[in-house]
Image (cartoon, helix red, strand yellow):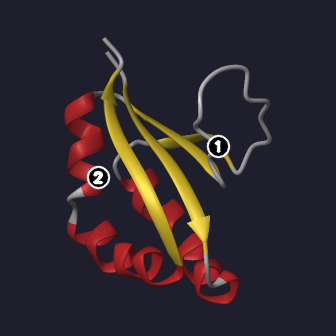
Amino acid sequence: MPGYVIGDVDITDPAAYEEYRRLTPATIAKYGGKYILRGASYEKVEGDWSPKRLVLLEFESFERAKEWYNSPEYSEVKPLRHKAATSNMLIVDGG
């Protein structure tokens, strides 16, 4: 079953975030992941959640998504996001 990473990102420093955006795709691809949504527009139909920038990644499994998130490659890039944005992220089992 696939694994997903769901992110809600509020960019506070657009210039610094561009570096994160440039470096992250290679880390995702190395772990077999792909972008499903990246900053997509949306229409809220229920609830209070209003994501700023919605991101959805798909991996072959929940475990593979966790491997990517905790990988040495992404661990080098992740601080750029922490510096340039506030985020909420989930890793979800697609089963």
Q: Residue 62, position in %: x, y?
A: 26, 30
- Residue drawn at the location 58% of the way across and 46% of the way down: 55
Instruction: Between residue 17 and residue 21, name the one nearer to us.
Output: 17
Instruction: Tell which residue pokes out farthest to the front in this image.
Output: 48
Which amino acid is tagged 1?
Ser
Mark 1 → mark 2, Cα distance in angstroms: 26 Å
Q: Residue 22, position in %: x, y?
A: 60, 74
Proximity of marks 1 and 2: CB atoms separated by less than 8 Å: no
- Judge depth for marks 1 and 2 and give the one in front: 1
Q: Quadrant of the C terminus?
A: top left
Q: Residues within 10 Å of mark 2 (few under 14, many from 20)?
A: many
Instruction: Between residue 51 and residue 1, name the one nearer to us.
Output: 51
Where disc 1 sits, the SS reads loop
Where disc 2 sits, the SS reads helix
Q: Which mark is residue 92?
A: none
Q: Quadrant of residue 92?
A: top left
Which amino acid is tagged 2?
Trp
Q: Residues within 10 Å of mark 1 (few under 14, many from 20)?
A: few
Q: Quadrant of the N terminus?
A: top left
Judging by the rendered image, the residue that carries numbered circle 1 is: 50
Instruction: Between residue 88 and residue 37, name the one nearer to us.
Output: 88
Q: Residue 85, position in %: x, y?
A: 52, 73
Residue 3 vertical placement versus 51 (above, below): above
Residue 52 vertical placement versus 12 (above, below): above
- Residue drawn at the location 65% of the way across and 79% of the way down: 18
Nearer the N terminus, badge 1 or badge 2?
Answer: 1
Q: Residue 59, position in %: x, y?
A: 39, 34
Judging by the rendered image, the residue that carries numbered circle 2 is: 68
Number of dots carrying numbers: 2
- Residue drawn at the location 58% of the way across and 37% of the way down: 49
In the shown orientation, is residue 4 left or right of residue 35? left
